[in-house]
Image (cartoon, rainbow, N blue to C red):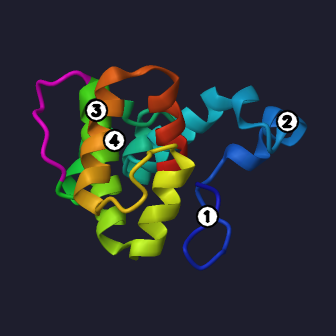
Amino acid sequence: LTHGKDGEVRLTEELTFSDEYKLHYPNHNKYWELIAAEIQCFGANTFVTMFRGGKGVFYREVLMDVCDKLKVNYSKDAKTAFIEDNLLLKILRDSLEKMSPEDLKALAKELNISDLNCSAEVLLGAFQTIFRAGGFKSYQLTLIIA
């Protein structure tokens, strides 16, 4: 959010100028609202944001834009959490397809999956089950994906 792919500071970012950011960085949960606002502005057109009084687009719109860009299958009428799950599973699927057998084995071990010789398809199926069940394991998996 604060730096581009080239490592340069983004001209339009405002997060690092806030007192909360300066006080709590890198403890992001202390200023998550500012991060959310930055994402909303980052996901919007800069000039349109100026006319909105510095307000960006809603999170759901940013989420759907990301899904469209990554070719995630979702319904515009679905609940936001369901769209998020589809996005995470798409990212996971793409990541698993790029992993070597050794990487897949290490990931299975990290998640305490007993069959350490499982394929990307088996892991994806396990992850889908974990997401549907929700709870802490789903949260843990989301952090691993991130």
Q: Which mark is residue 99?
A: none
Query: Element at badge 4?
Result: helix
Mark 2 surroundings within 10 Å by alpha-carbon count, few (fewer than 14), some (14 through 19), many (20 or more): few
Return the disc, 1 or 3, that comes first in the chain's sequence. Answer: 1
Q: Nearer the viewer, residue 68 or 4?
A: 68
Q: Which residue is mark 2?
A: 24
Q: Amino acid at mark 4?
A: Phe
Q: Amino acid at mark 1?
A: Arg
Q: Which mark is residue 127?
A: 4
Q: Are marks 3 and 4 in contact (CB under 8 Å)?
A: yes
Q: Nearer the viewer, residue 129 or 19?
A: 129
Residue 121 image point, x, y percent: 22, 57
Mark pair 4, 2: CA separation? 33 Å
Mark pair 3, 4: CA separation? 5 Å
Query: Element at badge 2?
Result: helix
**Dominant SS type (magenta):** loop
Q: Amino acid at mark 2?
A: His
Q: Which residue is mark 3?
A: 129
Query: Element at badge 1?
Result: loop
Q: Which residue is mark 1?
A: 10
Instruction: Specify the quadrant of the image occupied by residue 69.
Output: bottom left
Which residue corresponds to the image point at 32% horizontal and 35% vertical from the top-left? Answer: 84
Which residue corresponds to the image point at 59% horizontal and 79% vertical from the top-left? Answer: 6
Q: Quadrant of the N terminus?
A: bottom right
Q: Is residue 60 visible?
A: no
Q: Nearer the viewer, mark 4 or mark 2?
A: 4
Q: Is residue 118 visible?
A: yes
Mark pair 3, 2: CA separation? 36 Å
**What is the magenta range?**
72-79
Residue 125 image point, x, y percent: 24, 44
